[in-house]
Amino acid sequence: MIKYDYRGVDSNIIGSEHGLNVQEEFNNYRDKISQIITDLYQHKDTPGQWLQWMNLAYTEETVWYVKEYASMVEGRFDNILVLGIGGSALGGLAMTEALLKPYWNFLTEEQRENYPRIFFLDNIDPDSVRGLLDVLDLKKTLVNVITKSGSTVETMAQYMIVKDLLEKELGDDYRKNIVATTDKQTGILRQLADQEGYKTFVIPDDVGGRFSVFTAVGLLPLALVGIDIDEVISGLKDIDAELQNTDINSNIAAQNALIHYLSDTQKGKKISVMMPYSSRLCYIPDWYIHLWAESLGKCVDNDGNLIHSGQTPLKAIGATDQYSQMQLYNEGPNDKIINFIRVEEFDNNLEIPKIFEYTGIGYLGGKTVNNLLDAEADSTRVTLSDNSRPTVLFTLPKIDGYHLAQLLYVLEMQTAIAGALYNINTFNQEGVEQAKNYTYALMGRSGYEESASEIQEKLGVNV
Amino acid sequence: MIKYDYRGVDSNIIGSEHGLNVQEEFNNYRDKISQIITDLYQHKDTPGQWLQWMNLAYTEETVWYVKEYASMVEGRFDNILVLGIGGSALGGLAMTEALLKPYWNFLTEEQRENYPRIFFLDNIDPDSVRGLLDVLDLKKTLVNVITKSGSTVETMAQYMIVKDLLEKELGDDYRKNIVATTDKQTGILRQLADQEGYKTFVIPDDVGGRFSVFTAVGLLPLALVGIDIDEVISGLKDIDAELQNTDINSNIAAQNALIHYLSDTQKGKKISVMMPYSSRLCYIPDWYIHLWAESLGKCVDNDGNLIHSGQTPLKAIGATDQYSQMQLYNEGPNDKIINFIRVEEFDNNLEIPKIFEYTGIGYLGGKTVNNLLDAEADSTRVTLSDNSRPTVLFTLPKIDGYHLAQLLYVLEMQTAIAGALYNINTFNQEGVEQAKNYTYALMGRSGYEESASEIQEKLGVNV
């Protein structure tokens, strides 16, 4: 089971200006937290509450269909190409990077046990799109296009380009190289997929993009490259059982939610850093940034008051970013709370050879880089603590589907609980609608002519 | 030449609560800025001022040696492996990612015109280190180990592992597969390199890691993969000529420095976002984060006053992060200034085919993804402006060595000028020393026993 340690935020250790009297706050908020958790679980099936992500541990049917399709196409493709952006890419990206052997796409077929390479195309930079399409043999590529609404303009533009190329290469057979993950009924992608006859997977109602990693959005890419998704679901079930506990003293998601909320609103910690000590976990912060930023960055609360809520989430990777950001964390404004993620046991134990024994680096010989990475994480955490900078620590016993699912679900639940503490709508994202409308206008979509003329006047944008 | 536009921060456009009366501020700070620039150029050769990075446009000798070595080893290696961390990795990483064809390491030898693939190993995660070493044929790999001090523990641990493996595979010949970039006289790496007989390159005195991209630290990896470093130096010379101008009205580095400084200290913009609309520029923000965070995050000013200065730099990539962070930027706390980077002309012009004409995505057909990316950037910038969020805009005519060098140098100069405005030491990083000492202690380096016992008591760290 994933572990959590909040001593680094306790006022006994870092002082009361920046630290919290954690046990006292747990007592103060005990009833409120209990109510929040009870409400979440009570409303998880209520339409329009966007809480269906809380049921994803129990969707045996989806898991079965994903596995069945993955096994059906096994051995048929050299590459998986995921077309998606935001929540349609980040979960799959973060989990495959963590769970596949490092440098997966550079391994031989044999080393990959015949599972395909996997690429996520999550931008529309013309050079990168062109570059990736040149690298892939599309005939041997399975394209998974993912968008719930079907109107995500970047993804649909990618899809149009790729579909056209596939059809030119494969004729009518191109349909077998496309699998769509989208809404069960509505949207253009659903319409086209049905019309064209693609295999499709459904993104359930009331699951937002940033909470969709355990739907087919995330599970299908995982299964296609040979990752055991039963293990993922098993971790999810076990952590869900833990997080149903309404007592904050036994619920780590509630604990970290409250600690973040109070650190933000009472101690000026406007930034939440996510810092795994592992390169394999390098996209976990990206996934968290989306989750935390989009869920909590809101301008009105549930009572209609104008607020501007939301910590800014920040990415750092240990040990690398000790050489980039740690100076600022230690000496700059004390405006951050830093989430360390540690791994207890790596797949490899890598020894530093006993060479250059009588030089200034001789002391490293015979140790492992595992020792070194641990020492770095401890040293950094203690130094931050010395400087009264708050930290919390998640520990994964190892990097596998079971524990990774637990980490992501804790962060999801923590986000939902934090949203309730801020008294905001955690599950909408109205702040990005205006820019989408402007984009439609600039691209000539009919019905948006008015904002096209509006945008032309601003900031010297010439259409 | 690189272009810069600050209208998005002007109070006429976003209002005076969050915007600046830019022209008035330029006038107010005209003399001070002029003095700062004059001082910087006057002291650039003064030992101990750490300003030698300002001379790197004029180090013909280094450029010559780098090119000579690169041409000598041309065709001999399949891979370049850079061992370095922080400033020893980020500049080379950011520039090669931008200047090489996208997905370079996946291209065939022919597509790469026989230039090698390139990998940066900037962490000591045991699984990733092991994974990369398994992927590379070390016999055909040139290892560039980079550390100025020679005591960077992560890099030296990597070096010890790789050197041992190389020697086992190649016998005495392994020396030809190692090239060291380090101090000209001092440090363990210098000592070992001379003793073992490696080819070496010098990191000049008084150039800090985060300002070292235009030394051999950055230039050698570029040259080894066939990038024209003369073009880089040419861009550097031309921008240096511009930035010697002491009039803020004609100096874009001074302009962005002042705008950031005032936005931080007067308008509460504690976060500086760097957001290129280009996947090829995806590591430019990482390089900038190191530069901005470590240079400006300081706890004392030059008069010994206790301060906690420094904006927190943040990474975002357009259009991707519109689907991740933009909700927060628009509706959350108005505590950010956002640096857009636009590219005028990409290498490719990628058309979206005219298909599905009578559906809701038909309007995209016949447009290019270039159009779309431009529309996204404009829409996002205007929306932020609508919400009174300050933005500035850098424009690169195209992504090449000439313009990229200009961008990086503007950001370096901007950092130096901002440091002078904050009245701090821009070039030290004392806030990371304590953690390094703790790490030495935990790893059993002699002379550090005392802090080992100290750290054991803190936060439950068990050694």
Image: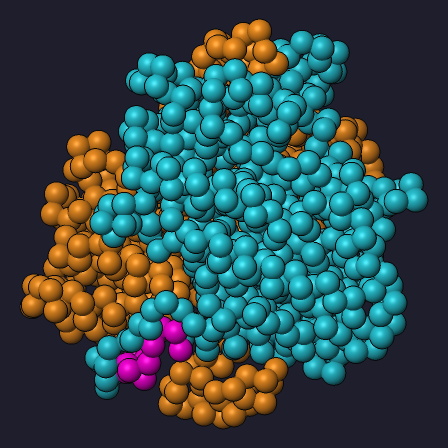
Chain colours: A cyan, B orange
Q: Which residues are magenta?
A: A361-371
Percent of width and height locating residue A299: 82, 41
Name the residue nearer the viewer: B33 or A412: A412
Residue extending furthest left? B172
Magenta stretch holds residue A196:
no
Q: Quadrant location of residue B94?
A: top left
Q: Quadrant location of residue A332?
A: bottom right
Q: Is residue A196 visible?
A: yes
Q: Is residue A326 left or right of residue A111?
A: right
Name the residue nearer the viewer: B59 or A80: A80
Q: Residue at x 75, y 78 (%)?
A: A11
Q: Residue at x 37, y 67 (%)?
A: A347
Q: Residue at x 39, y 74 (%)?
A: A370
Name the residue nearer the viewer: A350 or A27: A27
Q: Is residue B333 left or right of residue B351?
A: right
Q: Is residue A118 visible?
A: no
Percent of width and height locating residue A227: 41, 51
Percent of width and height locating residue B140: 14, 52
